[in-house]
Amino acid sequence: MGARRYVGRKFLQALLTLAFVLTFNFVLFRVLPGDPVGLLARSQRLTEQDVAALQAELGLDQPIARQFVTYAGQTLTGNLGVSLRSAREVTATIWSRIGPTVLLVGLGTLFATVIGIWIGIKGGWRRGSTFDTTSLYGSLALYSIPEGWLGMLLLLVLSGMLGLFPAGGFETGGETGVARLVDVLDHLFLPVLTLTLGYVGQYAIIMRSSMIDVTHEDYVTSARAKGVPEHLVRRNHVVPNAFLPTFTLIFLNFGFVLGGAIVVEAVFSWPGLGLLTYDAINQLDYPVIQGVFLLSSAAVIAFNLVADITYGYLDPRVREA
Amino acid sequence: MAVEQVQEVRSPRALVWQRRRASAATHWRTFRRDRQGMVGLGILSFFVVVAIVGPMFIDPAAIEPATADGPLLAPPSIDYPLGTDNFGRSVLLLMVQGARISLLVGFTAAFGTMLIGSSIGITAGYFGGTRVDTMLNAVTNWFLVLPWIALAIALTAVIGPTLVNVIVVIAITSWASTARLVRSQSLSVKERPFMERSRALGAGHWHMITRHVLPNVFPILFANAVLMIALAILSETTLSILGLGPANAISWGRIIDDSFSAGALSAGWWWWLIPPGVAIMLVTLSFTMVGFALDEVLSPRLRSR
């Protein structure tokens, strides 16, 4: 398959998935137990007139097909409705919360991948060594810890008992310039540490097992047979090929990291999308929950597309599959 | 096997089961040599016994907020080995009750995951290459891509956080990877010669799927199920911390959430926060170790390395 056709097909698949998410979102909040007004009535006690007025306002008295068309049109033009609590537009609210989440998820993923891959390369290359066994059990243990609880534990000990770090939030406030930057980093340290610890194990395990897979390939044996020094075999023949599956995982895992970030933000009161979601859950603010669902799904779909296209470029064999 | 030949003639079904029992016994002997798997199994057995037997010895009034009569937020003592919570309930008793709920969620949610994932995966694989496969595969890929947490939050927020709903939500959000695994295995089983022989003898789709594909997919499914239980327990914890845990039951995740909401972090009530997290970690780790060990026992490709 040509490169252009491959990219085209992947792009089309991503669009179809997005269409599925749009439909799913519509069905979930309109057809399941209650329509948005029913859900609102449950959470806010509305009179029958209120319900009828709201239904007319939201267009819920229209036929379902027309509702879907209106909904799809609005969503595609970036109109996600209005928050039930703050009366602000959902799109604007979400937009203002993206920065902190990108900062947190970005740094957490960066540290987790770099450290995890380093551990995986070292352990997989010397399989069965003390370093390998220790890091493998360590990775498994880290994988088994719920991120939210890990964050709480760090807060309990390092912030609550020892007072080394602030108890949460983005900044203390009132600082400017370099002092503010230091203050934000101080607040950022524990949440990033939590995310890093939460995901480093998975990357280490994947990198290790793909190192072990590649070490058994014929081209590695031939490299050794023609006298390539061990460190060059590792650097030029094993690591680049072992890196491929890990690379896809980094992108595919983005959805999970996002999930971890939601919990970590809730624990550390980090004012990103996660905290927004957490507050929306507790206030039954359905438009916001829907908006975050759409946005995070779209982000994950986009990341998968990038992963597919890059992978097809790095490893032309997958284009044939 | 030599034993079978000296025995009297039996029905084919009895023979099949005899062979399966023999094969299970062989696998068990291999598994027993895997130290990691056995340690995991040991820890799990402890928690399973606690979850089944423990709650029988608990007076329901002692873990009911209104009727609990212990001191409030007392640190560990002889009477209350893990201290008490803000209602004066013994954290140890909550942990025992939590073991039942958390394991129940883990087992049932993983069972649901297997049920959905294997039916879709086997159907897709068995009808591989046809329109049925294309369609099921598309749905599977959609669910693989959707961020599970966002989907779980949206679903739970709409249908309400009860114990049954949380189990259903976890199953609905986690079946896709199982379906993909089962599909690829079914695709390879489908190409084996005995399938053609069976078809030539007049077997229908149902017979072929249940009698030939399923038994061959089962080992992989079993190892996957064990790993899925671990994932389900972690998912329940995440949902609980977000306030979407089972509202009508005490799970380990719920204990964590309660202590967090009551302000355990700043007040330093460590005895309330630490035990549930440690228990979740131990159980998840054990399921993972058992799952990895099963993978090695049941798929000879790994064993030979």
Image (cartoon, rainbow, N blue to C red):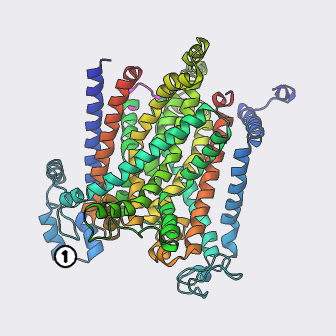
Give the vertical position of B240 relative to A115 (above or below).
Answer: below
**In front here: A35 or B138?**
B138
Q: Which residues are magenta?
A: B126-132
Residue type pointed to by label 1: Glu
Whether residue B119 is visible here, answered yes or no, is no
Visible in this render: residue A248?
yes
Q: Give the percent coordinates (x, y) of residue B266.
A: 47, 76
Q: Which residue is mark 1?
A: A48
At a point 51% along the width and 61% down the height, the residue shown is: A150
Q: Dot 1: within a 10 Å radius of its alpha carbon, few (fewer than 14), some, or many (20 or more) residues?
A: few
In the displayed structure, does residue B184 sit left or right of residue A71?
Answer: right
User: In this rendering, would A274 be left or right of B192?
Assistant: left
In the rendered image, residue A143, in percent from the top left (x then y), is placed at 54, 50
The total of numbered circles placed on residues is 1
Closer to the camera in the image, B52 or A280:
A280
The answer to whether residue A275 is left or right of residue A118 is: left
Q: Nearer the viewer, residue A88 or B96?
A: A88
The stretch drawn in magenta includes residue B171: no
Residue, far top:
A226
Based on the picture, tell me whether residue B130 belongs to the magenta stretch: yes
Quadrant where the N terminus of chain A is found in the figure = top left
Is disc 1 placed on a helix, strand or loop? helix
- Please tell me whether residue B206 is drawn above or below residue A256 in the rendered image: above
Task: Tell me if residue B198 comes above or below residue B59 in the rendering.
Answer: above
Q: Which of the 4 image quadrants contains residue B135?
A: top left
The quarter of the displayed image where residue A131 is located: top right
Q: Is A153 on the left-hand or right-hand side of B43? A: left
Q: Residue at x 42, y 67 (%)?
A: B243
Tell me the residue at 47%/31% (across/down): A243
